Image (spheres, rainbow, N blue to C red):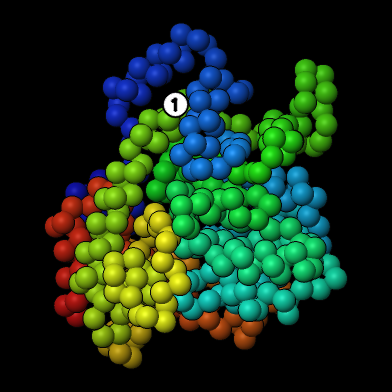
Amino acid sequence: MDNNKITVTSPLLPNLDEFHEMLKEIWDSKWITNNGSFHKKLEAALAEYLKVPYVSLFTNGTLPLITALQALRITGEVITTPYSFVATTHSLWWNGIKPVFVDIDPNTGNIDPDKIETAITPKTTAIMPVHVYGKPCDTKRIQDIADKYGLKVIYDAAHAFGVEVNGESILNAGDMSTLSFHATKVYNTIEGGAMIMHDAKTKQRIDYLKNFGFAGETTVVAPGINSKMDEMRSAYGLLNLRQVDAAIEARKNVARQYVEALKDVEGISMFPYMLESFGYTPLSLRKGTGVRLNYSYFPIFVDAKKYGMTRDELYFKMKDQGVLGRRYFYPLISEFSTYRGLDSAWPENLPVAHKMANSVICLPMHHALTDEDIQRTINLIVQK
Ligand SMILES: Cc1ncc(COP(=O)(O)O)c(C=O)c1O
């Protein structure tokens, strides 16, 4: 790899010697997948770390979404956000469910609760919000709407590892939440993911579903899928759990430097909650206090007129200089060919999401960025 390049992310890797030791144990046991001892240990350790009652490990973060919809027998239409990674909406499509896109809140990037009710039809059975960039959705408002109309809520919490509100895990909201442990995430198992549920019966059902529906040697209770995490990745995950808090602290330090250097740059803006996280608190936005963020991404928004350069001009300028931001989430999911024809995908229905997608750049953000990397990135933005 080109050492001069600053990448948007970098995987958190366990200590190799410790990993070797665990691999030796796995080799000796000859138990390499199917609910082995490392798998069991990681489920228990994650439940404790994340402060949730039950965790079911998966082989990535897409299959728990698909499986949650199966387990809750969701059909018809599901209300969701266009401002996410495509897997959110794909999980609906794979279940034959029609996605109904609702616009987002400009202050958070999350689905706007004020716009959910008008999108509900007699076919609506659930809401699938995303805690985008790890910022918690307004879970109370969403639950109130769901209760009023008898809808299920499945949170795509792929970005929200370790995120808490007033000491409580955001993963306890809704009927189920799903996580991604992909290499690019705050916490990774190379590829991997998990589902969070509230009770033992649901955990049991999910464990069957991720193992072809097997409930015993000769009993298949449902048309399940294969989404089991193997022993190697479970061991890797146990080691990474030991260092994830330090990684989040390192990310927070990166975010602090970005906030301090960029908060007053004309034409560059960031989410109010990010400013608030470092004490730059507009009084009117104080209600977010008490959130433990994970600093999984650092999005900035470019106002071309005020900044004097378009988002893409800045993005490609950075790229030319070896600073690799990403335009997450551009294009919107509703712009991809599979979804573009849906009524709810019309740009007129999603003005905030379009504006955000057309102005965002996620800056390099990971635990291993040096002060020099951060300064190089900042300089490219400040010195036009
Ligand atoms: C919001 C969101 N949902 C789902 C996924 C899918 O996770 P995975 O890549 O582990 O399948 C990702 C990331 O990759 C994501 O960012």
The residue singled out by tag 1 in the image is 235
The picture places residue 230, in percent across and down from the top left corner, at 54, 27
Q: Is residue 28 above or below residue 200?
A: above
Residue at figure coordinates x 20%, y 60% from the top left = 374
Q: Is residue 140 above or below residue 61?
A: below
> The residue under label 1 is which amino acid type?
Ala
The picture places residue 97, in percent across and down from the top left corner, at 76, 60
Q: Secondary structure at mark 1?
A: helix
Left or right of 360? Residue 72 is right
Quarter of the C terminus within the rendering:
bottom left
The picture places residue 327, in percent across and down from the top left corner, at 41, 67
Query: 124 or 13: which is nearer to us?
Result: 124
Q: Quadrant of residue 141?
A: bottom right
Q: How many marks?
A: 1
The local crowd at label 1, few if under 14, some if 14 to 19, many if 20 or more residues have their Cα within 10 Å, is many
Residue at figure coordinates x 46%, y 15% from the top left = 26
Residue at figure coordinates x 41%, y 18% from the top left = 23
